[in-house]
Amino acid sequence: MRIGNLQRLALLVFGILSLLPMSFGQQSQAQTEPAKPKKVLTPEQKAYQQQWGEYMAKRQGLQAQAKQIFDAEMAREQTGDCPGAQNTYDFNICYGNQVTITDQNLRRYEGTIQDLMAPMPQMPGKSANNMPGPAGPSLTPEQVQEEFDHVEEVWRQYRDSACTAAYHQFNGGTGGPSFEGQCELNLARDHMRELDMVYGHALHL
């Protein structure tokens, strides 16, 4: 029994001693292994980070502004345009004023969309050239702006023609101007909804 215990004790001590060099070796390696240097940004990368932060902050502000304009105009539509008008003269004056307000909101909305089309900052070393996608080539920011301007020009031609036709439905009668105003209001608000649908990826937070 005593010899067996001594043998087991000797084997245990031998095992511990055999592990010590490995342990010391690992500690020595950990102590001598140099720390990985922290990545230092170049001046160009730092400038890009700052530009990107400013770009995103401005973009979020424009998106919030677009939402405020859109919601305000939709609320005006829900309220009704001329609930207090009593006669044809009142309607003509009221709709004229309402069209002026809605046109201002529409132009502000268009301007906000144009501002959101500004090109994003380019990462250092990356080309600004637009690469073709799976569905075809992407447009440059300048081409996107030209396309938007064309859409708005064509739409205004359509609205003028349609609302002139609405005016003519009264055959020169006094109700023509107010009906033309209703046409302009309805088409302008519908167009704001169209813009929200077409450019929603840029407009929404």
Image (tube, rainbow, N blue to C red):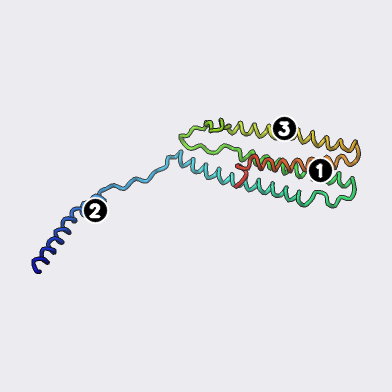
Q: Nearer the viewer, residue 182 or 54?
A: 182
Tell me how far mark 3 sits from mark 1, CA to CA.
20 Å
The residue shown at (56%, 31%) is 136
Where is residue 92 drawn, in percent x and y?
86, 44
* Within-10-Å neighbours for mark 3: few <14, some 14–19, many 20+: few
The residue wearing badge 1 is 182
The residue shown at (86%, 46%) is 91
Give the side of residue 82 with respect to residue 53, left or right: right
Question: Foreground mark, 1 or 2?
Answer: 1
Where, by quadrant of the figure, is residue 6 drawn? bottom left
Q: Secondary structure at mark 2?
A: helix
Q: Amino acid at mark 1?
A: Gln
Give the side of residue 205 with respect to residue 167, left or right: left
The residue wearing badge 2 is 27
For this orientation, the residue located farthest to the bottom is 1
Where is residue 65 drawn, in percent x and y?
65, 47
